[in-house]
C-alpha cells in the first residue's frame, strides 16, 4: 500500500456520490432507450446540461456509461443492474446505501457517545423506511441466490422455515427449485405482509406465513428439517443470538439443519473488508448488532445443541453459509 491507495480510499465517497446521484436522477432508466446527448438528458430532467455532462463523464470513467461522439449510453453493467424493471435491478439497494450516508457522517459522534443512532429515526418514518429496506433486501438477494442455490442441496428437505424472511426472495427461489418443498416464512407482522406479495397463487399452496418476534415468540417443536436464517444475527448481540439458536434447535426435527447466511469475519475480525465495514454500519444503526467470526457462531451453535458445523464459502460474495446439524442423542 502507498500514498496513492490512501488517496483512493479518500475518494471512495466521491465515486459513491456520483452513482447515488445518477440513481436518484434516474439517468440509467432514461438511457435505456439508447444514445443521448447531455443536452437531451438535461432537457428531460430540467437540469444544467454543462454540469450534468461532468457527472456523465464520471459515470463513463466508472464504467457505468459509454460515450460515443459526445453521446452517452448505459454500459452493459448499468444495463443489467441499474435500469428499473430489469430482473437483476439493484437500484433500490443503491438507494439504501445512499440513505445511510447521514448515519455514517456521524460515526465520530457515535464512537464518542458509545451509543447507536437508532433512536434518532422518528417513529412515523419507520414504516416507509421498512418498505424501502425490503426492496433493497430483494435486490441484495438477487446477487447471492444463484450461488446459494448452487451450493445448497435441499432435496431431502420436506419442511423449511425461512426465519427473518424479509421480502421472501430466498423462499421464492427455494420453492421454485424444489417442487414439493413446503416453506414457512417468519418475520415481524409488517414484513410478512410485504413477503406475501412475493408469491403467486401457484406457489402459495406450499407456503405458510407467521408474523412474530423471534426475541419473544417460540418457533414450535420438531416441525422443520431445515431452518434458513439469512442476514438476521448481525442485528443482535450474542445473548439474543444464543436464545434464537436454542429456539431453532427446538423447532428442528431429528437430524435437522440450521443454515445461516451471513457476513462471516475471520478470527481477528479484520477480513473480509465488506463484513468489517458492515460491523460499523450495525454499530451506527442497531443496539447490539455486530458482524461475527465463524468461531463465535460455531461456539453458540454447539452450546445450542448443534454439531458437524461447517462453513461454505460463496465464491465472489462477501457472505458465507454456516451449516450445523442438530445433535441427536
Ligand atoms: C437484513 S433483513 C434480511 C432479510 C432476508 N432474510 C434476506 O436475507 O434477504 C433482516 C430481517 O430480520 C427481520 N427481523 C429482525 N428482527 C426480528 C425479530 N425480532 N423477529 C422477527 N424478524 C426479525 C427483519 O424484519 C428483516 O426482515
Image (tube, helix red, strand yellow):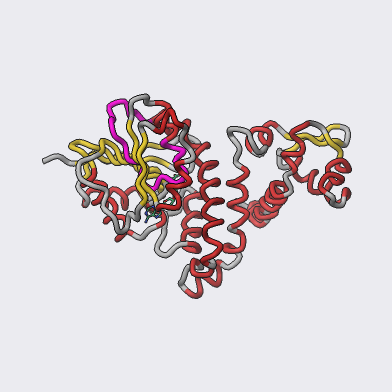
Q: Where is residue 27 drawn, in percent x and y?
A: 75, 43
Q: Is residue 56 magenta?
A: no
- Extreme residue toward the bottom, this view: 113
Q: Where is residue 243 drawn, in percent x and y?
A: 27, 56
The answer to whether 224 is drawn above or below residue 216 in the figure is above
Q: Residue at x 81, y 47 (%)?
A: 45
- Look at the image and tell me whether residue 224 can be seen: yes
What is the quadrant of the C terminus in the image?
top left
Q: Residue at x 49, y 69 (%)?
A: 119
Q: Is residue 80 left or right of residue 32?
A: left
Q: Where is residue 140 drawn, in percent x and y?
A: 52, 42
Bounds of the magenta segment:
152-171
- The quarter holding residue 168 reads top left
The answer to whether 49 is drawn above or below residue 317 in the figure is below
Q: Where is residue 104 drawn, in percent x and y?
A: 58, 62
**Which of the two residues, 213 or 311, is positioned nearer the viewer here?**
213
**Which of the two residues, 117 or 167, is positioned nearer the viewer here?**
167
- Look at the image and tell me whether residue 263 can be seen: no
**Which of the two residues, 307 or 138, is positioned nearer the viewer here?**
138
Q: Main secondary structure of the magenta part?
A: loop
Amino acid at each position: 500500500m502507498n500514498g496513492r491507495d490512501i488517496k483512493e480510499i479518500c475518494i471512495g465517497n466521491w465515486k459513491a456520490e456520483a452513482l447515488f446521484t445518477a440513481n436518484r436522477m434516474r439517468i440509467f432508466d432514461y438511457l435505456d432507450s439508447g444514445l443521448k446527448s447531455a443536452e437531451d438528458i438535461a432537457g428531460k430532467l430540467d437540469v444544467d446540461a454543462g454540469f450534468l455532462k461532468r457527472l456523465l463523464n464520471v459515470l463513463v470513467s466508472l464504467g457505468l456509461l459509454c460515450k460515443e461522439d459526445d453521446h452517452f449510453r448505459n454500459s452493459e453493467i448499468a444495463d443489467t443492474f441499474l435500469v428499473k424493471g430489469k430482473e437483476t435491478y439493484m437500484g433500490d439497494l443503491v438507494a439504501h446505501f445512499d440513505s445511510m450516508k447521514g448515519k455514517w457522517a456521524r460515526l465520530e459522534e457515535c464512537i464518542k457517545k458509545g451509543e447507536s443512532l437508532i433512536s434518532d429515526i422518528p417513529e412515523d418514518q419507520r414504516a416507509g423506511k421498512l418498505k424501502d429496506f425490503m426492496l433493497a433486501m430483494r435486490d441484495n438477494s438477487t446477487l447471492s441466490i444463484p450461488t446459494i442455490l448452487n451450493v445448497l442441496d435441499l432435496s431431502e428437505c420436506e419442511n423449511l422455515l425461512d426465519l427473518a424472511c424479509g421480502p421472501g426472495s430466498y423462499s421464492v427461489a427455494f420453492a421454485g427449485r424444489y417442487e414439493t418443498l413446503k416453506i414457512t416464512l417468519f418475520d415481524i407482522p409488517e414484513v410478512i405482509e410485504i413477503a406475501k406479495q412475493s408469491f403467486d397463487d401457484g406457489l402459495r399452496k406450499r407456503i405458510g406465513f407467521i408474523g412474530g418476534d423471534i426475541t419473544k415468540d417460540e418457533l414450535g417443536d420438531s416441525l422443520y428439517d431445515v431452518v434458513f436464517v439469512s442476514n438476521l444475527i448481525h442485528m443482535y448481540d450474542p445473548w439474543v443470538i444464543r436464545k434464537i439458536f436454542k429456539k431453532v434447535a427446538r423447532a428442528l426435527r431429528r437430524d435437522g439443519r440450521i443454515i445461516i447466511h451471513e457476513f462471516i469475519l475471520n478470527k481477528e475480525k479484520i477480513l473480509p473488508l465488506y463484513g468489517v465495514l458492515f460491523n460499523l454500519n450495525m454499530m451506527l444503526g442497531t443496539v447490539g448488532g455486530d458482524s461475527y467470526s465463524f468461531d463465535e457462531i460455531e461456539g453458540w451453535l454447539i452450546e445450542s445443541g448443534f454439531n458437524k458445523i461447517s462453513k461454505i464459502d460463496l465464491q465472489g460474495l462477501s457472505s458465507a453459509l454456516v451449516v450445523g446439524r442438530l445433535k441427536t442423542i
